Amino acid sequence: MAAGPGRDQRGPMERLVRIAATLRERGAVGETGERLAEIAGFVGASPMDQLKRDIRSLTDQGWQIDNIAGPGEPARYRMRTVDNRLRVRLTPPQQRALQRAVLLADRDDLVERLGLGERGPGERDARTSTGVVAGVPTAGHDALLATVLRAVRLGSVLRFSYKGRPRVVHPESVRSQNGTWYLRGQEDPAGDDAPVKSFVVARMSEVAADAPRSARPVRAARHRELHPMSWEIDPPVEVTLHTAPEHHPDVVRWLGEPAAVETDGDDVVLRYVVTHRAALRARLYELGRRVVLDGPDDVRRELVDELRALSGGA
């Protein structure tokens, strides 16, 4: 009689339990790959490949298992006791979003408890390991975000390149909108009455923070209404849009009431006084071909540059 499905799974499940139990017992010291392969009962060709498959099965189930051997040394695995329920239930993009939230809250303790750190061979702890800050890799965009967030928390002046020129900014806050992180602050040498500008973190380069408490206090941007198009983030600029009469209600729904409405042949011309350029661009993307941005040129240039960046520079 053929073995039932439950009996077919008993051997592999018992093997995984033996590996996990051994690693749990060995604690911080860990166990060599050779010994684990022996405990698992792997025989024949490529026992280490078979062991790696089982290690992957355990990590897929949410267990934190790291190879802590140095470069060129035989594999040594260590299992860390963490609350793996979130790792099981969240998708990789959701886990990355949670990592950024942990970074924003400056909660390294949650990295440890939830197993959210991203570690490589030889790394000991999310708080001290090279390449990781609060569970977020210190490379690329996430490295910039870590520096910017730390500057906001500590009240540090930020120095970076943006749109081809150096900037010195007194930070006010960091916000996320539609998956994009923005720094808001006042740029030197404008002074206390300068407008609070918005900078896309991913477009910064050569980011550095001065000493803690080196930045002057910055008033929060005034949000007189809930609609983001009314927020005073950037200096006011008059923007001109063209649309067809049938799309006029769509434009008003997304952008609010215009400052002026004119006609140009069969088209409707709408003029807006914009104080939040990022919000304008986000809504123009939603409107798509229903609207045409006529000007001014610098606003058009920002839109084209952002679209080029989103498309990978194509």
Image (tube, rainbow, N blue to C red):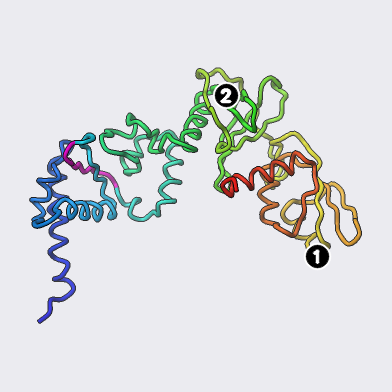
Q: Report the residue at 69% width, 45% height from top.
A: 303
- The picture places residue 68, in percent across and down from the top left corner, at 22, 37
- The residue at which mark 2 appears reads as 159
Q: Nearer the viewer, residue 273 or 141?
A: 141
Q: Report the residue at 40% width, 51% height from top.
A: 92
Q: In the image, which is nearer the foreground, mark 1 or mark 2?
A: 2
- The residue at which mark 1 appears reads as 246
Question: Which amino acid, mark 2?
Answer: Arg
Q: Does 255 sit left or right of 169 as displayed?
A: right
Q: Does 273 sit left or right of 44 as displayed?
A: right
Q: On the rendered image, what quadrant is the N terminus found in?
A: bottom left
Q: Report the residue at 24% width, 53% height from top.
A: 58
- The picture places residue 308, in percent across and down from the top left corner, at 63, 46
Rendered position, 148 above or below 21: above
Task: Specify the quadrant of the image occupied by residue 265.
Answer: bottom right
Q: Which region shows up in magenta?
A: 73-83
- Asked if the residue under mark 2 is in contact with the one under mark 1, i.e. CB atoms within 8 Å, the reply is no
- The picture places residue 65, in percent across and down from the top left corner, at 24, 45
Q: Earlier in the sequence, mark 1 or mark 2?
A: 2
Task: Specify the quadrant of the image occupied by residue 70.
Answer: top left
Residue 79 falls within the magenta-colored stretch: yes
Q: Which mark is residue 36?
A: none
> Is disc 1 placed on a helix, strand or loop?
helix
- Counting every numbered tag in the picture gives 2
> Is disc 2 placed on a helix, strand or loop?
strand
Instruction: Decide: few, some or many residues near mark 2? Use Cα within 10 Å; few <14, some 14-19, many ≥20.
Output: many
